[in-house]
Amino acid sequence: MDTMKWEDGRLLLLDQTRLPGCAEYICCEDHGTVAEAIKRLSVRGAPAIGAAAAYGLVLGAMKLDCRDHGEFIAGVEKVAGFLSGTRPTAVNLNWALERMLDSIRSAAPARPEDLIDIMLREAEVIYREDLEGNRKMGEHGLELIPEGARILTHCNAGSLATAGYGTALGVIRAAHEAGRRVSVYADETRPLLQGARLTCWEMVQEGIPVTLITDNMAGYLMFRGMVDLVVVGSDRIASNGDVANKIGTYGVAVLAREHGVPFYVAAPFSTIDIRLGSGLEIPIEERNPDEVTHIGGVRMAPEGVGVWNPAFDVTPAGLVSAIITERGILRAPYEKAIRAMY
Amino acid sequence: MDTMKWEDGRLLLLDQTRLPGCAEYICCEDHGTVAEAIKRLSVRGAPAIGAAAAYGLVLGAMKLDCRDHGEFIAGVEKVAGFLSGTRPTAVNLNWALERMLDSIRSAAPARPEDLIDIMLREAEVIYREDLEGNRKMGEHGLELIPEGARILTHCNAGSLATAGYGTALGVIRAAHEAGRRVSVYADETRPLLQGARLTCWEMVQEGIPVTLITDNMAGYLMFRGMVDLVVVGSDRIASNGDVANKIGTYGVAVLAREHGVPFYVAAPFSTIDIRLGSGLEIPIEERNPDEVTHIGGVRMAPEGVGVWNPAFDVTPAGLVSAIITERGILRAPYEKAIRAMY
C-alpha cells in the first residue's frame, strides 16, 4: 500500500495510527488537514513527513487568493511556516519545505496557477527522488548485510516512513530481494508501537521472517548472540555524524557496541543537517504524557504519576558503524566523509 | 493494601493483574487456585511467590486425607512438586517449599492436623521474616542512597512483590522515611507493565515523587544525566553474583555502567542460589507470545509475526555495584562475599 497518493488535486495519506488493524486513507484537501495528520502521526517517519509537507504546501498554495508572484510567494511562505511548526526533530520537513519555496522563488515571474504547477512538479520530484534514493540505499547497503543475517531494527524506517521502499527496511528488503536469507527482530517501540504495528506489518507482507520483541529484550537478545547487526533510520544527522532517531535508538546503540554488533543508520542525504555541529543542537520533541500512561485508549498507570516522553534521542557518532545514504556509505570520521560527499 | 492475607483458613491474594484500576482479592481455598494465581501473575515477585506457595502448600495439606506422618509427608511433597512447577526462574519458590517440607520432615511423629499447624506456623514465619528482612534491607541500603537521589527502577520490587515493604522499593521507601528527598523514575516494564501499573501505584500511595518512562527511554535518561543510581530486585542470584531479574534489567545495567551510574540489586538472602556457579545455569522462563502481541486484550501486531518473550534476563556480576540483603551489603568479589555471609 502506498504511504501517500496525490489524486485529483488531493493528498491521500494512509492513516498509520490505525495500522495494522485498519488500512484507510485520510483525504487531505487543505494544508491544515496535512498538518494535523503529521502532528498526530497519521503520517510519520522523517522522509514521509517531508514528502507529505511538500504536497501539503501545494494544497495550501491552491487555496491562496493572490494575483502576483510576490504576493503568492509570501502566502506560500506563511503556509510553509505553519507546516514547519508541526514537528521539530525531523529535518526533512524543513528541507522539503525550503526546496518547495526555492522552486517558486527561482522561477521566472509567472501567474499563481503556473507557480502551483511548478510546486506540484517539485513535490512529485521530492517524492520520486525519495523512492529512488531508498532503492539506491538498499543497493549500497547490500555490502553490509551478510547471507543469513539476523537483523535488529527499532521503530519503523520502512516504506511507511518514506515515499516507499524504506531506509533501514529498504536495506533489509534489498538484501531479501538479493536472495540473502535475512531475518528481522523488530523492537516494538513504545510508546506508539511503530515496530509492532508497522515494521512487523511490512515484513509480514514482504514475506521476510520477523520476530517481535519488547524494547527491553534487545539487550538480552544480543547477550544471547542472536543479533548479527542493527540497522535503523534517522530523523536528523548532525555534521559530526551524531544521529537523532526514535527514542530508544541510543540504548540499542550502546548495547550493540557492548556486544560487538555493528550498528548502521540508513537515511537519505537530506537527513544530514550540516548547520548543526553536533547532536546536542538537535531539538528533541517531547510529546503528550497520555502516550505513555495509556495504551489503546486505556489508562495503564495510576493518576498522580509524572511522565517524561521524549520522542527521540541522540546517538553519538562514535556508536555508529556506518551511515548508509543514497550517495554511498559514510564511515567515521563523519565530518570529513559528509563534506566529501556534499 | 496487603499483597496476601491468611484469613479463616483461606489465602487471599491481591489480584495484581488488575491493578491499579481495580484492587480485588482472589480467595484461594486450595493449592490449585494458588498455582493458577502464580502462573498468571496475579501474585508475582520472587519473595511474594515464595510466601504464597508456602500458604498454598498449607491449603494443599489441609485437603489431604492421610492417617500417618509418612503418608502425610508424601502427600505434601506431591503438592509441593505441583506448586514448584508453576514458574521456573524465581528460586524463592522452591526455597520456601523446601523450608515448609523441612518443617514437617524434622518434626516429631504427629497427627496430620498437628503437622498442618506446624506448616501454617512455618508459612507465617516465612511471611514475617520476609517483611522484617525487607525493612532491614532498607536500613542497610540507606548508606547507598544520597540526599535528593534520582533513582531509576525496573519492574516492581515493591511491597506487592514481597510480603510487604519491598526489596528495591523498600530501599527507596527507607530513604524516603529517613527524610532524604528521593525521587523515582519507573521503567514501565513491558510486556506486563509492572512498572507502570504497580511501582507507580505504590509510589503514588507513599507520596514519593515518581516519573514514568517507557523502557526504551532509560538510556537517554542517563545520557541526559537525570539518574543518580539504579536499584532493582532479583528472582535468583547465582553464587558468583550473576543476577536474574525481570527482562530488561540487563540492558539497564549495561547503560548504567556506560554512564557511571551505580547499579544496585536488593534481594533477600534466600534469592541466592549457591548451587549455581553462574547465571548461565538459571532457567529463564519464556511466556505466552500474546503478552507481547496484545496489550489490554487488544492485538497490536499483525498476524504472522514470530515472538520471543523471555520473562527474565541475567545481569553478569561485573555490572552489579552491590547487592543489598537483609544481612548486609555484598560487594564484589561476590563469590567470597556470599560465602562469608552464609
Image (tube, coloured by chain):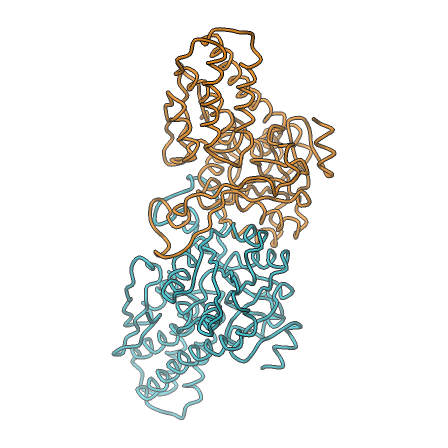
Chain colours: A orange, B cyan
In the image, residue A209 lies at what x, y percent?
53, 39
Q: Residue at x 53, y 32 (%)?
A: A46
Q: Residue most toward the bottom?
A: B108
Tally of marks? 0
Left or right? Give the position of A120 relative to B336: left
Camera-side residue of A59 and B230:
A59
Residue B99 in the figure: left or right of residue A340 = left
Image coords of residue A140 (percent x, y): 67, 29
A169 versus A214 height, above or below = above
Residue at 53% x, 74% y: name it.
B142
Q: Is residue A328 rendered to the left or right of residue A21? A: right
Q: Position of residue A124 (x, y in %)?
A: 51, 17
For image coordinates 30% across by 79% down, the residue present is B62
B115 and B224: which one is in front?
A: B224
Quadrant containing the C terminus of chain A in the rendered view: top right
Where residue B108 sits, quadrant-wise, is bottom left
Residue A252, above or below A3: below
Q: Quadrant of the N terminus of chain A?
A: top left
What residue appears at the point 32 percent right and 63 percent down from the top-left corner? B15
Give the vertical position of B41 relative to B223 (above or below).
below
* Image location of residue A228, percent across then percent down: 64, 44
